[in-house]
Amino acid sequence: MALMRCDEELIQLYVDGVLHPAEAALVEAHLQECRACRRQAGFYKSLYWDLGRAAGLAPEPPQEPEALADLLLAEHRRGEEPEAPPATTWDFATLWLRANPAFTRPARAVSSLGHIGAEGLRRAEGLREGLRRPGKWPRWLWRKGGG
Amino acid sequence: MDRDASIIQLCRQGHRAGFARLVEAYQERVYRTAYTFVQHREDAQDLTQEVFLRTVRAIDSLDSSRPLWPWLRRVTTNLALTYLKQRKGHLSLDELPEAALPTSGPSEPSWTRVDLQRAMAELPPLWRMVLTLRHQEDLTYDEIARLLELPVGTVKTYLFRARRALRARLGSEGGDGWR
């Protein structure tokens, strides 16, 4: 009397050794009676064996080990470098550039910056002139500071 | 101190020998695993490099009392999964393409390395991954499920389908035995 019907998944699991002993006993009893399932079990046994060695089918790593080790060392050193401290000292030119974002976009044509951009350029020229001659502030800065 | 603990220690101290030993010990294994997953040489190389870079970045947080390979395998698997999901124009990760179906029924098991390699390459990536993790890495079904973040039932289904597909493919091709 057949204890179970042909079941390929059970055969796979049996050969994989993951069935509960009671289930495994059922499969073993079935295998004694069923030639087709015995052939399947034989196939899977061979397949699992070969799959276990299939890593050797992959090609050799193409990258030179020395180059990879150097890359890793560089990455490690990069990670150990302290981060650059934020700038704490500001000069007038830096403050002005931060306050005029339009001027910090050199890729844009000056003509496209509009009134604010043109004004920024004019002020920059004045600021440069003022810095070139210490003690003499540009007129626009003096006006603003002086109210 | 075992090999992996020594490698981790040397790497933490920034000794080049540590990184050289790390690469020597695991580059081939990581690359072959990545290649098995993605089936592409250059991409497997990129993945391998990224696996090691991430390992170096995490070197201070690694437990030196535990083996390195499970960590490397997890990073390799996660990166391969991300890569496979992002790959443009790729077929479904878990369905067998029509072209990979065998044209005739199975016969006696007899195949060559090339047959097996080709049949593996034709499997949907997720099937190939669970198959590799089970039969090459010897992980349990539960471990595979945790690693791939899949239900155990799905892992069993993929394994069953992958093995059946290989039986259909290899059984139908014949050959002159394992070489």
Image (cartoon, coloured by chain):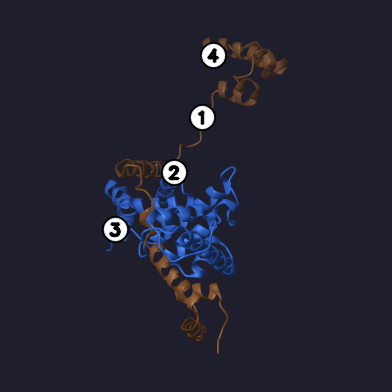
Chain colours: A brown, B blue
| Crowd class of label 3 (few under 14; some 14 to 19; many from 20; radius 10 Å) | some
Q: Quadrant of the N terminus of chain B?
A: bottom left
The CA span between labels 2 and 3 is 26 Å
Which numbered circle lies on residue B46? 2
Q: Name the residue carrying label 4.
A: A131
Foreground residue, A4 or B53? A4
Q: Which of labels 4 and 3 is toward the front?
A: 3
The CA span between labels 1 and 2 is 42 Å
Secondary structure under tag 4 reads helix
Secondary structure under tag 1 reads loop
Residue A109: image quadrant is: top right
Which numbered circle lies on residue A124? none
Position in image of residue A108 (x %, y %): 63, 18
Q: Is residue B28 above or below residue A41?
A: above
Secondary structure under tag 2 reads helix
Residue at mark 3: chain: B
| Crowd class of label 4 (few under 14; some 14 to 19; many from 20; radius 10 Å) | some
Q: Name the residue carrying label 1.
A: A89
The CA span between labels 1 and 4 is 17 Å
Q: Are marks 1 and 4 on the same chain?
A: yes
Residue at mark 1: chain: A
The CA span between labels 2 and 4 is 52 Å
Q: Name the residue carrying label 3.
A: B6
Q: Residue at x 40, y 41 (%)?
A: A78
Give the amino acid at mark 2: Asp
The answer to whether residue A132 is visible is yes
Residue at mark 4: chain: A
Q: Quadrant of the C terminus of chain B?
A: bottom left
The CA span between labels 3 and 1 is 45 Å
